[in-house]
Image: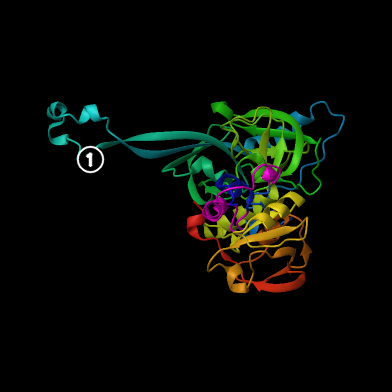
Amino acid sequence: MRLSPKHVGIYTVLLAAGCGTGWFGHHFFRQTFSQHLSDQQEVKAIAKPQAVTTSLQSVVETTRQFATPAAILEQNNPNFIAEAVEQVGAAVVRIDAARSVAEDIPEAFQHPLFKRFFGDKEPTAPFYEHLEKGTGSGFIISSDGSLITNAHVVEGADIVTVTLRDSRTFEGEVLGSDPITDIAVIKIEATDLPIVSLGSTEKLSPGQWAIAIGNPLGLDNTVTAGIISAIGRTSSQVGVPDKRVRFIQTDAAINPGNSGGPLINDRGEVIGMNTAIRANAQGLGFAIPIETVKRIADQLFETGEVQHPYLGIQMVNLTPEIREQINRDKDLDLKVTQDEGVIIIRVMEGAPAEKAGLKQGDIINKIDGAIVKNATEVQTQVEASAIGEILEVEVNRNGSKETLDVLPTALPEELQE
């Protein structure tokens, strides 16, 4: 029996950059892997936020320095939310993006009877242009005008306008954008700007306070508060499998317009960047961990782009049910005895994995010495690797352990769209 395009698109993982996986699966499997895959939510597994030792300061001018950590607010202070917001609020901005979009002229207006109204100005093609506008949020990380926001806020923008809380307005230049992690960086020409204090998610846990600041629905400088509902949500769980992020979940209200604004803790430190990615997520909001934001922004400020490591394999988490499905599938021609682990079900032609000798049916045990138990953990280790540097992959092949040296390359451009 063959595999269903729907389920393989959802449950296999292309070790590329968190996008494009399902495309190859649609050509590989065509039927089955039905209800047994419903609990496999590790599609396009996203790298777990890692502690980042580098900072944006190494990428920008020495005058651009992060604020010192905010003073710990008194736990019994009834105004701690207001005080936390005051430490950050002035550095939160509104971002208005506009782009020109060409559309077809309605057929009725292309009738010859209308030509006399145009004269010499008759259009040469059946289309017209209009300006699309969108609003989002962002936050300032250097006193001379370096900002961070979501990539989807400025996607395709011809004009970007940044408005500060004190109503000053600046023209912004998008220095780089990474759609895979939904992070973009902007520069405005200004000095002595207020900046945020960056925190950490290392000790973040559900139940802690979470405060969101932004411009939801065009309402500037809106503050909402709640708690951290969960951490480490994969992009598949959140419903955006094309992203390479493990999200912070919060019940602080996050709506369109909040995208790109900061999520802060009760000390006024930025722990994440809000993103309104689920229009139907009533009572749920999501934020990109600040470590991921810093790591990606680091590269964008330096080179204007981000390169994601790519191996070129598809894999699925093993369960007793999945093992039985694989063993019954004549097209796969595999005999699997394990009930757990991560099995490679396809190796892309010409990909680094194929060149290194990885094969269909290999069960991945370790990546660079780190034990991996599921597809998410495999992707975590791949994301943490460096392009052009050897990545050791230990597999179980027909009962024998083998270690192969894989040389990751950059994610092909066609898989980033």
Q: In this orientation, which residue lies closer to the viewer: 89 or 244?
A: 244
Q: Which residue is mark 1?
A: 125
**x then y, percent, for residue 372:** 76, 59
How far from the left and from the top, in percent, is residue 220?
58, 28
Whether residue 55 is visible here, answered yes or no, is no
Count the labels in the image: 1
**Helix, strand or loop under label 1:** loop
Foreground of the two, 148 or 328: 328
Q: Position of residue 254 (x, y in %)?
A: 64, 31
215 in the magenta segment: no
Res 342 visible: yes
Q: Is residue 293 above or below residue 92?
A: below
Residue at 75% x, 51% y: name it. 319
| Residue 241 placement, left or right of 160 | right
- Residue at image position (69%, 28%) is 283
Q: Is residue 302 or residue 115 the one in the foreground?
A: 115
Other residues around mark 1 within 10 Å, as few (<14) / some (14–19) / many (≥20): few
Q: Main secondary structure of the magenta part?
A: loop
Q: Is residue 346 above or below residue 289?
A: below
Q: Is residue 39 magenta?
A: yes
Q: Which residues are magenta?
A: 13-41
Residue type for callout 1: Ala
- Given residues 289 and 21, the one toward you in this image is 21
Looking at the image, residue 389 sits to the left or right of residue 120; the answer is right
Q: Residue at x 73, y 69 (%)?
A: 398
Q: Residue at the location (56% across, 36% down)? A: 164
- Residue 160 placed where, x, y %? 46, 41
Q: Is residue 81 left or right of residue 388?
A: right
